[in-house]
Amino acid sequence: MARAGHRRLDLKQYEDGGVTDVASHGAEIEIVPVNDKRGRAAFVDLGRAFSDRLPHFVPQLRSEQLELVDPGKNPFFGHARVQLFIAKRAGQPVGRISAHIDELALAMPAEQGFGPGTGFFGYFDAEDEGVARALLDAADGWLAGQGMNRMLGPISLSIWEEPGLLVRGADHPPMLLMGHHPPHYAGWIEAAGFTRAKTLYTYDLDISKPFGPLVQRIVQSGQKNARITIRQVDKSRWDEEVATILAILNDAWSDNWGFVPFTPAEVAYAGKKLRPLIFEELNMVAELDGRPVAFMLTWPDVNGALAKIRGKLFPLGWITMLRWMRHPKGAGMRVPLMGVLKEFHSSRLASQLAFMMIESIRLQANGKFGSTRGELGWVLEDNQGMVAIADAIQSKVNREYAIYERKLV
C-alpha cells in the first residue's frame, strides 16, 4: 500500500506518453517522460528558467548541463538507469524531476546509506506544491516499477555531482558545482512524506590570515618530519596524477555514508573535465616515504566569471572566461575533495597531513592569487574527523544541504 498522503501513479499510463494527475489551480498536471535529445534540451532549459528566478543564483554553461543528462556523454549512464520527467499544466512546463537507479549504489552495504532497493530522484523543480507532489509520485511510480522500495534525493544525478537540497545559505551565491534552491522546496518535499536521511555542510574560511597557534605547531612538526612530503600536482603527468588521486579517494571514502566508487570511465571523464580548473599550486598530494597517501583538490570559483557572462560563452563571454582561466585573481577557493588512505584514519598523521596541505594551499591562494576566502565542502554531518579539522581552522558552516528519503511500499 502506498504511504498515506501520496498516490502512486499507474505505470501503464506511461506507455501513452504521459500520465495525468489532478493538481492545484483546478487544472490537470501531465507528467511527460523525456526520452530524446529534444526533450533533454527542454528539461535543461526548464531547470535554467527556474534557477534564473532565484536571488544569488549563478547560471552555468548550458552545454555542460546538457552533457550531464546525455547518455552518450556522461559515463554515469554506464552503470545507471535514468528517466527524466517534465510536468505540464495546460500544455505549459511547470516542473521537472529525474528518477534514477545507480547499479553501483545498489551493490553497496545498506548501512552506508544506499544498498539494495534504493532509487533516487534529482533535478527537482516545481511551480507549486501540487506540481511537486505529482513529480515526486511519478518518480516513486517509476522506481517502484523498477523493483525499488526506497527513494532518496535530491541527488542530481551522481552522488559526486550535486547531492542534497539547499536548506540554509541561499542568501549568498553558491560556489562552483554547488546546488542552489528556493527555501519552499524543503517544505513541499517534507509534506510529501519524506524525512531527512543525511545532512551535508559547507564551511566558510578566511584564508587571508594564518591559522591559530595549535595548527601552526602541527604543521611545523610535520615539516620537520623527513618522511613526509607535500607536493603540488604535476599537470605534465596529468593522467597519472588523476589515477593516483582517485585511487586514494576510492580507498579513503570507502566507508563513508553514500559512497559509490568511481569507474575507470568516470576517472577519465573527470580528469578531462577538471584539467582546465587545476592550477598546480592549489592542489596537493601528500607522500609518506615517497608513497602517495593523501590529497587535497582546490578549485578557483569560476562562478564569479560565469555570473558576469550569465552562463553564455557567445558572443563575447568566451573572452571573459579566457582571461579568468589565465589568472583567476581574487577568486574564492573551493575544496571539494580531500582524502587520506583508510589505513591512517585513526592516526594523528591523518590530521597532520590535512593541516599541512591546507596551509600550503592557503599560502598559494592568498599569496599568488590574492584570494581571501575559501570554502570546504561537502562535509557529512557525522564525519567527525573533517568536522574537527574545520573547527580547528576556525571555519564556519555557511551552507546546509539535506538529502531526504521515503519508502516506496
Image (spheres, rainbow, N blue to C red):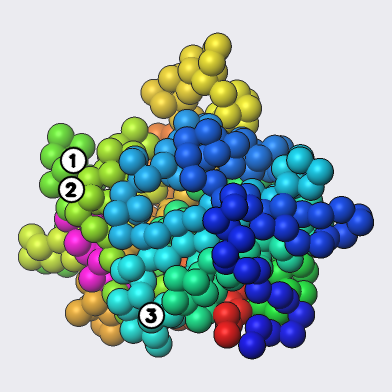
Q: Position of residue 372 (x, y in %)?
A: 54, 44
> Label for residue 238?
1
- Closer to the eye: label 3 or 1: 3
Q: Which residue lies furthest to the top in this view?
A: 315
Residue 79 colored in magenta in the image = no
Check contact, mark 1 vs mark 2: CB within 8 A.
yes
Q: Position of residue 98 (x, y in %)?
A: 55, 56
Q: Establish if 383 lies above or below 283.
A: below
- Closer to the eye: label 2 or 3: 3
> Label for residue 53?
none
What residue is shown at x 27% (from left), y 71% (from top)? 252
Q: In which quarter of the image is residue 138?
A: bottom right
CA neighbours of label 1 inside 10 A, class few (<14), some (14 to 19), many (20+) = some
Q: Quadrant of residue 115?
A: bottom left
Q: Where is residue 258 in the image (x, y as percent from the top left)?
A: 42, 73
Of the image marks 2 and 3, the number of the one nearer the N terminus: 3
Report how far apart the C-alphas of labels 2 and 3 lie in the structure: 31 Å
- The residue labelled by disc 3 is 115
> Label for residue 241?
2
Q: Tell which of 308 and 289 is nearer to you.
A: 308
**Residue 312 shown left or right of residue 89 in the figure:** left
Q: Where is residue 316 in the image (x, y as percent from the top left)?
A: 55, 12
Report how far apart the C-alphas of labels 3 and 1 lie in the structure: 33 Å
The residue segment tinted magenta is: 244-253
Q: Tell which of 363 and 86 is nearer to you.
A: 86
At label 2, the amino acid type is Glu
Q: Quadrant of residue 260?
A: bottom left
What residue is shown at x 50% (from left), y 81% (from top)? 149
At label 3, the amino acid type is Gly
- Judging from the image, what secondary structure is the residue with disc 3 in? loop
At label 1, the amino acid type is Trp
Whether residue 65 is visible to the viewer of this picture, yes or no, is no
